[in-house]
Image: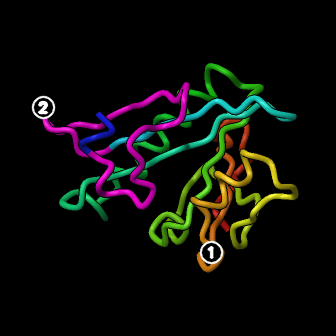
Amino acid sequence: MWQVFREHHYLNTERLGAGVRCYVAKTGDKPIAFIAVAHVHMLVNYFRVSRLVVLPDYQGIGVGKRLLNFVAELYTSQLQEIPFYLVTSNPQLIRSNLDGWRVKRVGHGSSGRNDSRINRELVKSNSKRRLSVSLQYIPQKRCGGCTNA
């Protein structure tokens, strides 16, 4: 399904990372939005959005935000102890009111702290000129009224 959406994402790689789970929003039989979620096992165990894409004809009407919130709620309701993150440089997502999301970091991409293979690969996808925001999904029942600041 990624092949349908990849030309509309700036990280339009041939394949997604190993182990990502993909979800699609449709209208009728037509796929209109795509999200891929990676489970990261490092020093900290967490889920993160790997890709979020909405086809151009459906952008700006809340489809991506609804799909993002649906998947975040799905993960956090079933696996409450594992955090769910989104790192984005998309101005519409950054400026929108994402209820249930808490800002964790605002800044520019980093190339990492050492010259590991993983950091060299991450550098290819980062844009040091692009502002990015890291957000963590906190379900409303645990959120205590948090809003996107």
Closer to us: 124 or 4: 124
Relative image position of residue 26 (x, y in whole percent): 22, 37
Left/right placement of residue 89 relative to residue 114 reads: left
Q: In this view, does 52 lie above or below 139?
A: below
Closer to us: 26 or 45: 45
Q: Residues within 10 Å of mark 1 (few under 14, many from 20)?
A: some
Q: Residue at x 55, y 43 (%)?
A: 49
Q: Residue at x 69, y 52 (%)?
A: 145
Q: In which quarter of the image is the N terminus?
A: top left
Question: What mark, if any, has residue 5 been given in the picture?
Answer: none
Q: Residue at x 31, y 45 (%)?
A: 33
Relative image position of residue 147 (x, y in whole percent): 65, 59
Magenta stretch holds residue 9: yes
Closer to us: 5 or 88: 5
Question: What element does badge 2 sit on?
Answer: loop
Q: Quadrant of the C terminus?
A: bottom right
**Residue positioned most to the top:** 78
Number of disc labels = 2
Highlighted range, magenta: 5-33
**Which marked residue is nearer to the observer: mark 2 or mark 1?**
1
- Give the labeled residue for mark 2: 29
Left/right placement of residue 119 relative to residue 51 reads: right
Relative image position of residue 133 (x, y in whole percent): 65, 64
Left/right placement of residue 53 relative to residue 129 reads: left
Question: What element does badge 1 sit on?
Answer: strand
The amino acid pointed to by label 2 is: Asp
Q: Residue at x 74, y 52 (%)?
A: 119
